[in-house]
Image (spheres, coloured by chain):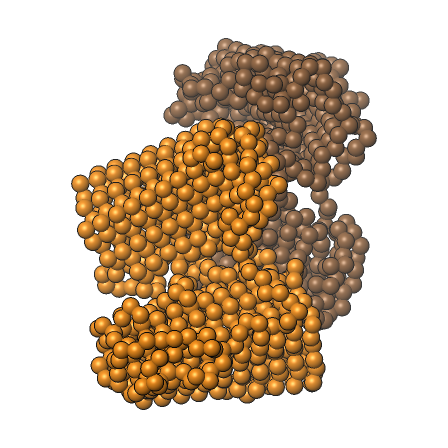
Chain colours: A orange, B brown
Amino acid sequence: MAGKHLIVSGLVFKEGYTPSNEVIAFRENKTELAYYSRVTEVVIDNFSNPDKFESDYWVGLFGKHNRFDHSMLVGKRNKGVTMAVRLNTEASRENHHRIDHNYFGPRPMLGSNGGETLRIGTSHYSLSDSLTVVENNYFDRCDGEVEIISVKSGANKILNNTFFESRGTLTLRHGNGNLVEGNVFKGNGVDHTGGIRIINRDQIVKNNYLEGLTGYRFGSGFTVMNGVPNSTINRYHQVVNAKVENNTFINVEHIHLAAGSDAERTAVPKNSYFKNNLFYNENNKAPFSLFDDISGIAFAGNVSNLLKDNKIKSGISAQNFSLTKASNGLLYPNENSVNVGVSAKLKPTIKADTGPIWYAKKEPIVSFNSGKTIQVSAGENALFDAVEKASEGDVLVLTDGNYVENKIITLNKTLTIKAANAHKAKITFGRSTLFAIVDHGSLSLEGVVISGSESPDSTGNTLIRTAKWGMLVNYRFSMLNSIIEDLDINHSFHFFDSGSRAFADYISIKGNTFKNITGDLFRMDKEQDDLGIYNTEYLTVENNTFDSIGGAIVKLYRGGKDESTFGPHLSFVNNKVLNASKDKRNKTLASLYLHGAQVVSISGNEFNDSAPIVIEHTVGEPITVVKNNSLTKTSLPSVKELHAKGPHTAVLLNNKQY
Amino acid sequence: MAGKHLIVSGLVFKEGYTPSNEVIAFRENKTELAYYSRVTEVVIDNFSNPDKFESDYWVGLFGKHNRFDHSMLVGKRNKGVTMAVRLNTEASRENHHRIDHNYFGPRPMLGSNGGETLRIGTSHYSLSDSLTVVENNYFDRCDGEVEIISVKSGANKILNNTFFESRGTLTLRHGNGNLVEGNVFKGNGVDHTGGIRIINRDQIVKNNYLEGLTGYRFGSGFTVMNGVPNSTINRYHQVVNAKVENNTFINVEHIHLAAGSDAERTAVPKNSYFKNNLFYNENNKAPFSLFDDISGIAFAGNVSNLLKDNKIKSGISAQNFSLTKASNGLLYPNENSVNVGVSAKLKPTIKADTGPIWYAKKEPIVSFNSGKTIQVSAGENALFDAVEKASEGDVLVLTDGNYVENKIITLNKTLTIKAANAHKAKITFGRSTLFAIVDHGSLSLEGVVISGSESPDSTGNTLIRTAKWGMLVNYRFSMLNSIIEDLDINHSFHFFDSGSRAFADYISIKGNTFKNITGDLFRMDKEQDDLGIYNTEYLTVENNTFDSIGGAIVKLYRGGKDESTFGPHLSFVNNKVLNASKDKRNKTLASLYLHGAQVVSISGNEFNDSAPIVIEHTVGEPITVVKNNSLTKTSLPSVKELHAKGPHTAVLLNNKQY
């Protein structure tokens, strides 16, 4: 749309995607823009390009004095900011746009850079003022990447918005003189929920409420960055004159100050203060980490509960107080003497007051076991037929017997398949794959036995795989107490293979036995183009037994040099690994091969006569702990830093070799 | 189907694919088979699994005394033999099946192993007799891979079939005592058209007519292999007692004897003969190549025309004679004195006598320029709109002016786009890609100018690409006399990118200018899983100018150790290459990077200040010629043998360095 005083309302975009760069653009072309125009009560619902890494915006704001309000943007699954305020021509600067009362619904993890929900400006014009107001919006699980809102211009106001269980932060990335006031961040302890990150000059952050945030480093509940001296426009400008006052921080695990200090980022914050803020952590751990000299940040009039090891030595008064929930849903001190933190008058934006009232806000994911329970009898293609008939969330209970599957079972819904009696239902299959997880599919297996004995005599069979390429919808896979055996009819018979561009919210593998397998077990290594893309956020492998495995147990790959993702995470704990990963076709020469993983815990495992653990650190500040493993006839773990200089940063502790 | 005396007829399978391992199986399961049953006048037309490398058969013959006749199998595009006679249980051996009067229609190049049209048996049971009769079938351009028919069992009869312009051979791969009689092979000079390849004992090859066959090595017009002493069942058994008589070979370029002789294959043919055969090559070149001692092959009563350098010194009488086409369409000597070769009574199977008469035999490919000519005027999205409206084979003629394309132009038909006046129509584009070639798309460009100046400021833009993954239908791309410039708005801006599993019948690039490009030009390297798969059969690059190219000009990759493909082929001739391929992101460190290419000619080029040619030989017997190139401030070509021992086999000639 281009012109003046235009109003658009009541449109719903779904079941499709834009062939151009935007769904809604406040311009016709480079020169014809919109002014004093409004888009209200519009819905864009899962209107994502099916090619996940083809980039587009859903809303592009250009021109001046435009308003986008009471709309709903939910389920953007492809690359590209959900909504962008563009300042690329003079006619779009100092724009006085207003973005209000919108419902920014769940945006799933993208598994790469490019998943911000709202961006205002770009680094290029970030010294210009945008004068955009963002108020009374609800950000519901906006998990696309590390930045929820990325402010890249000056003089914006971010007011009274609610951030609910959203992984990432509101980041004042570029531009000066922004105001962040009256916002509520509720993390509820969800991984990587963050708050506010400050960079640049003259930022004011006041009267915000932050609770239950677990994020750390640049994703912390609160972060004040170090800058780069004489920074170019696209690096980190020094924090000067930041005012942080009357905010409430409750169970915010991390507040990082002078964060990112390194050989390049040496300009510490200056002329800044924290005043009259409230800090309360029920575990009594102080949230502060200091990464450089913070003498440029004055602390005054702040109050905390009794915290251990608080590195802020003055300006925070430690007191014994308790909290009660007020009618606005926020926690306040019971003691009148503690009168810092957010105002009692703060009125959080609630979900029901955002978006168009006539369009339902649906839950984005079907839970396992949320449907019917269906008994299945053994027989040829019995499971295939049962899956075809099942509905979302159903549980298929397999009675004892043999299930012979001669067709690939394509899963496009959330299903649980469990044995009525553990290990009494045995599945064999006659095609190259037993289960193919495709868009909208998620699978939970429990207590079954699956054998490759009837599989085709060819290489590369794979028991479970995703679509081979191009999934758009994230999936989940869980397996408990099952037996996977005799995937050995030919070489390179794999257990689980991720396709390129497939992404698992999680894969959870507990209490299973894997034996006699010629190929790999978890192939999460398809994104070899080094664009920061990877195949699973969480891979959890606990209390399993692996016996006689030709290929690698885990191949986990996250290439690229950007730092815009939290994962991948691996937990490999309390497993028994025997005679694993020594086949000559295992090019990694590793039982666990991890490249660019961000959070890794490998502990309590017994490795016997197996290939070693190989870990390659790339970017970010990966957290790698390898401890309490016993290594019999198995080499010690190898850890390398591929980019950082100096010794590797992994913690290797008490790994005993026999 | 399972049972006795069943008849199936009149079915058409199209627009779909089988969810199991076969479309038609002469069995219900492992034990319930078909006997004395017939499938007649059935059509399977382009009924291919959309995942090209998911394997299946279209027809599986099991049981005994079954007949498959007057049917049509056309357009199998996914992996897997079109029709298989299975001998995997005792109940399917000595089966006396009859396969007759079928039309085996065009099967496109698969670009990998697994594209045979008919297979009888497998190595495992190859010492069993099959007693299958294959007669009066028409094999029309069955180009899947190197074997058209693969006989892997004993006592079969291959009678009176026609092989029309089919790339590959009838191969007696395993099993003894087969009879090949009365067949007609017409190659018409098409690349890689072959005839008959003999391995094993007691094979009889008589009264066959072979004409216009260009194939060489294992794909020759005629091949007699060396064997492996005490061969395992799946290697090469020695040729013993082969009878080759009364065959006609006209313009058959290659007859290879004791072929494949190497350190393993040392058992030369024995007790065999060539008797009363006719050889005629109008270029007077003798077709014979001898790779080992052929004293075990007796020659007697054969006649040839006057041939130079004939290595067969006796048993072939060289005579001066001429040929005339007889009423059966075959060529016979005019001179009565020459009375060897095929019988005058041989009646070739003609296309019209095969398949069901009620189903049309369509041409598989739309030719460029076979449709209407349509004038297009310059403007925004003018080309996008014109392509949408165009029909198969149309020619879009662009009038002078600027074409600004803000949508990706998806090509799902065969189109030519040409400038009315060379270099007067200029195209720019605002998305990540200008042209995306998808299934059924082919593109010819002529005389246009395309610039990247208006493309998005992000990495990885690509002017032309195929579908990013999973094309099923081969495509063609041609570009003449065009200018491609300023693909430099960010790094890694590529010209042409093949998706994984996409396959070009050919790419032909002649007389163009490429300048100021940050990325690669021809990225035909997506099949990194080393399964013998590759992305183009022919890449022809002639008389172009390349100036200031950051990435590689050609990346051509064919991994894997099997030898079942003819390509890829590269011709890179008479080009000017200036300042190319030195960007630090060009990981190949090469201007031309060729891995596993089978036929390469690089000649008459001028390289100036550019990265070198890098060639990696893998398997097969690659034919690589690099000659008459001038290399200014450019390193000499590098050639490596990755598997074979000893010096490399490339011909490097007269490449002058300055």
User: Which residue is at 42% across, 80% downward?
Assistant: A208
User: Which residue is at 47% across, 32% downward?
Assistant: A425
* Residue B151 appears in the picture as rendered: no
Quarter residue B247 falls in: top right
Give the residue furthest to the right.
Answer: B358
Could you tell me residue B166's position as x and y percent?
65, 32
User: Which residue is at 56% across, 45% downward?
Assistant: A372
Q: Nearer the viewer, residue A576 or B549?
A: A576
* Residue A99 appears in the picture as rendered: yes
Relative height, residue A585 to residue A363 (above, below): above
Could you tell me residue B138's position as x and y percent?
71, 26
In the image, is A352 to the left or to the right of A233? right
What quarter of the picture does the C terminus of chain B occupy?
bottom left
For the image, the number of numbered tags is 0
In the image, is A332 to the left or to the right of B255? left
Could you tell me residue B603's position as x and y percent?
51, 49
What quarter of the picture does the N terminus of chain B occupy?
top right
User: Which residue is at 25% across, 80% downward?
Assistant: A318
Q: Nearer the viewer, residue B138 or A375?
A: A375
Q: Nearer the viewer, residue A336 or A112?
A: A336
Could you tell me residue B313's position as x and y percent?
53, 18
Quarter residue A198 falls in: bottom left
